Image: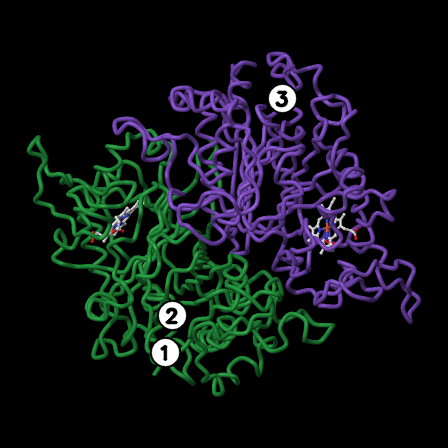
Chain colours: A purple, B green
Amino acid sequence: MSQQGTGRPSPTIGRWSRRGVLGAAGVGALGAGAGVVAGRAGASADGGGAGELTYAFRGAHQAGVVTPVQEHLHFAAYDLVEGATREDLIALLQEWTAAAERLTRGQPVTEDGAVGGPLLAPPDDTGETLDLGAHGLTVTFGFGPSLFTGELGRRLGLTDRRPAALNRLPLFAFDLLEEPISDGDLCLQVCAEDPHVAVHAIRNLTRIAFGTAMIRWSQIGFGRTAATTRSQSTPRNLFGFKDGTANVMSDETEALERWVWVPDDAEPAWMAGGTYLVTRKIMMTIENWDRVSLDEQQKIMGRDKKEGAPLSGGGEFTEPDFTHVGADGEPLIPLDSHVRLSHPDANKGQRMLRRSYNFVDGNNPLGQLSAGLFFISFQRDPQQFIDIQNSLKADTLNEYIRHVGSALFAVPGGIRPGEWVGQFLFD
Amino acid sequence: MSQQGTGRPSPTIGRWSRRGVLGAAGVGALGAGAGVVAGRAGASADGGGAGELTYAFRGAHQAGVVTPVQEHLHFAAYDLVEGATREDLIALLQEWTAAAERLTRGQPVTEDGAVGGPLLAPPDDTGETLDLGAHGLTVTFGFGPSLFTGELGRRLGLTDRRPAALNRLPLFAFDLLEEPISDGDLCLQVCAEDPHVAVHAIRNLTRIAFGTAMIRWSQIGFGRTAATTRSQSTPRNLFGFKDGTANVMSDETEALERWVWVPDDAEPAWMAGGTYLVTRKIMMTIENWDRVSLDEQQKIMGRDKKEGAPLSGGGEFTEPDFTHVGADGEPLIPLDSHVRLSHPDANKGQRMLRRSYNFVDGNNPLGQLSAGLFFISFQRDPQQFIDIQNSLKADTLNEYIRHVGSALFAVPGGIRPGEWVGQFLFD
Ligand code: HEM
Ligand code: HEM
């Protein structure tokens, strides 16, 4: 298993002062941090190739949503430690903002970095990416429902700032959730073209959180299973099918406004330009799936395996025709197929932006792959996900998958020059 | 945790006939399989870039030893199932040879592959790499001591074919081995530039083994921590140090003969051109290491963090001078430093070829990274590893690491045209 947690932890295992380490380079740097780095302009110590790819950290929306999906994911959910205060949380978000901005430029978390500080102190940065560039790193921040509710919400003074839509996801049919790998007060979605770069970011941001927040669960993923731009070819998931064909793409401006971004006049105001992030850890019973005939596999998905074309005919990007019937009078796209049930036609027209990753955590004691899909979707309202997931109740795919992790986070709007993430939550 | 096993499994969870699936395309293809594909000549469905990189499957030595280290690893150890016979093992090795050769060319495991077979049967290949090339895939085969000993060795008729050097590794000082992730009857080391391609190979080769062998444990690794050719820059491990500087390189012909390859006149003859593969799963207590001062980190390793130069001076590739002392009269490279203790000078001149990977299995219940080094080394005689590991007893590094998995495999010589792996073991 890839991750575990035991509920809300207490900070008893030694205190490493993140204040001391980040000091001036942390919050202080924010005022000056107005430079928006974009495209392939970032610095790269190895001087070449994919390492130089950088994405803008600041803008109207957070990065890592419509950004072309990178190859590697390290996702971490955090819980605040017992006793963490509103001031602690604010300081953490400020320091995370400063460090994440540097990381997305391909720089170490502080100016001193891994080797530039005093010889007799622990380095600010852990150093394993010293010779690597940004590799398209993005860091996306989210807030879980538990941050606003109960005793914690009161302590933080956030009880009345909770968006009405931000609740724990309901328990769905067939859910077999494991508590330690569900939910969380905060989350970081880190994506990069290089796995070292992604892991380094989570490691160093976790280190900065020491004393305020601890990892509750985390997930490593590889091989994106979606495209968010038309120049990315559609990748495949571990069932061998193209996944992401009918995604909301970054150039569908209207669809993004309608289905992904929270509008500017929304309630609460701090969510303007934000979105809601759903994660579902979905185990695949790979060995069972591999014994299913090609015909049956295709009928379960509603698309053909080779091209990803709907079974009603055409090519990968032809719209499915759910009315087509075969010689036997049965619909060519079966009634209980995944594509029919997840399609807007079955869901009051609703769509979402999917940005999932494959995972392989190793194998279980039977020698079977512990593998599946770490499903991530972004939507303007969690209800979109809830409706579609409810519609999937009838999905034959359920025989071959098991949802074991579940979480919902509110992703606040973009971080503009001089701001820190979630700042308006505390106004 | 990334992997588990419960000793020797029995084939009770449904039998999928690998014979049926591979049939003619398996052993039959071997006679014809004489083409040595090398360099960037392989086929790639996505038509471009790194996907096209292929390495020769056949030759004097197996691939995956001196091959330039790829970015991704999926290593699997297998146990034969209860009742598997000599004939079963031979058939498996023949089918693995045929399938692995196709995979290293960027092809599916059989000609029918993922979508070319009968619609009403499970596809031969699981299909998730349909649009990907070989991405530099190599498959390296090994045999564990347990294949030759006890009741299994007798049943297979292999008792007297065991190389004298092939024994379970001894228990070393500080070893905290977990049985389920140590040892194994067989192993496959799969490396590729793309994680999907590596996972796909293990998955499909495991499927072929169904009914004869099952995964005992497996490990996913990323970000090579060694170079085997001078054109590869030295990567860093999760302690942030360059790792692999003083490796045996693929152009050191003499050193390879002396330290890596089993000579042609060796006993037993089936090991001619082979080597011995050690794996050690080494957990790193990352959070503790990150609190150590730069000075202390460098003294523990015996090299500087930025350049990887020995503390006695010079650049990365300057030979360490162990006689140099500082102003305080102490050796600049401390007596208990890793580089001093692992250096040939401390080990009767012995060397080894290291080919390790980083791993991150997620995090533990304390929120700490479950991460470390999946150490892999190749040597002509396991004694080289044993001597160096014993020398590391005094290593200060031991305070920050924990060896939890251990295995030794005999890697038979190269597979020449028309042969299958390990063929001479059964002569
Ligand atoms: C392991 C589980 C899953 C697998 C293997 C899977 C696979 C696929 C595949 C192959 C497609 C067709 C290609 C495409 O348009 O992307 C698809 C479409 C889709 N899936 Fe899934 N999916 C899974 C889980 C989910 C979940 C949990 C949801 C949301 C609740 C979901 C929502 C969708 C949607 C909205 C579409 C597009 C439908 C359309 O507009 O045509 N999927 N999925
Ligand atoms: C997590 C554990 C380990 C870490 C972090 C580590 C790290 C390093 C580093 C940074 C170097 C210096 C650069 C280089 O020449 O590669 C090195 C060298 C070396 N290490 Fe390790 N190592 C570990 C475990 C081992 C083990 C288990 C062995 C073998 C028993 C080993 C054998 C060697 C050898 C032979 C050298 C080269 C020494 C020389 O010729 O200068 N290491 N290691």
Q: Is residue B424 left or right of residue A273?
A: left
| Callout 3: chain | A
In the image, residue A125 above or below residue B57? above
Q: Three-letter amino acid code at disc 1?
A: Gly
Whole-percent x and y of residue B134?
51, 68
- Which residue is tagged 2? B63
Q: Nearer the viewer, residue B266 or B9?
A: B266
Same subunit: marks 2 and 3: no
Compute the Cα span from label 1 to label 2. 8 Å
User: In terms of image quadrants, where is residue A111?
Assistant: top left
In the image, residue B235 above or below residue A96? below
Q: Which residue occupies the extreme bottom position in the image? A: B31
Compute the Cα span from label 2 to label 3. 52 Å
In the image, residue A256 above or below residue B66? above
Residue B87 visible to the viewer: yes
| Callout 2: chain | B
| Callout 1: chain | B
- Which residue is tagged 1? B59
Q: Residue at x 43, y 29 (%)?
A: A207
Q: Regarding mark 2 in the picture, which secondary structure is present there? A: loop
Within 10 Å of the Cα at label 2, are there few (<14), some (14-19), or many (20+) other Cα atoms?
many
* Marker disc for residue A147: 3
Whole-percent x and y of residue B254?
19, 70
